[in-house]
Amino acid sequence: MDASAPESVRELPVEFLFEFQVEFDAGMAIYATPFGTRIDAIVSGGKAVGPRFNGELLAGGGDWLIMPADGIARMDVRATVLADGGDYVHYTSSGRVVLDEAARDRFLSGQMITTPEMYGRAAPLFETAAENYRWMNGVVSTGVIVELSLEHIRYQIFAIQ
């Protein structure tokens, strides 16, 4: 190996940014498609609370989820957060939630699923012109899903350093 080559990275340091609690409208659409079960969950509100970012999740965003037969749900999220101080932050995310058949059936019946019963990760991106939060535009982050139900999702967002 070339002595001038940088060392390999074996671990990624992370910084906790905030916890996201997202509430969904009661009238979500759940329907079959050729690709799996679709869940169109529209945001009714929520909060972001953390050491570097706090705000209110505005109603109207959503999580458009597809749950195919392989048990791996694919997330497609769009939302707007009104940060403390009045600045807007656009939030997008894709992700995966791996559920076994029993957990998937419980989720679809309306029960809450927690971390020990699933593997849930998100890949959030942020967009804002707000000077206080401009640093978020360049952050690569990951979200760890802690709770998942038809009524809400709760996850913790970490910046990868």
Image: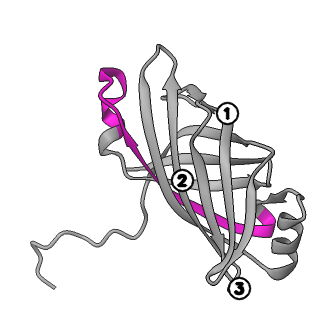
Q: CA distance from mark 1 to mark 2?
A: 14 Å
In what element is the residue under mark 2?
strand
Instruction: Read off the residue under disc 3.
Output: 69
- For this view, does 33 lie left or right of residue 122? right
Foreground residue, 1 or 126? 126
Instruction: Read off the residue under disc 2.
Output: 77
In what element is the residue under mark 3?
loop
Number of marks: 3
Q: Quadrant of residue 114?
A: bottom right
Instruction: Read off the residue under disc 1.
Output: 46
Q: Assess whether residue 126 is covered by the magenta stretch.
A: yes
Other-residue count near label 3 (Cα within 10 Å), few / some / many at <14 / 14–19 / ≥20: few
Mark 1 vs mark 2: which is more N-terminal? 1
Foreground residue, 149 or 65? 65
Q: Quadrant of residue 9?
A: bottom left
Specify the amino acid type for callout 3.
Answer: Ala
Q: Which residues are magenta?
A: 116-136
Picture coordinates of residue 124, whole percent (x, y): 47, 51
What residue is at 32 percent from the left and 34 percent from the top?
135
In what element is the residue under mark 1?
strand
What residue is at 25 percent from the left and 70 percent from the top?
7
Specify the amino acid type for callout 2.
Answer: Val
The quadrant of the image that shows the N terminus is: bottom left
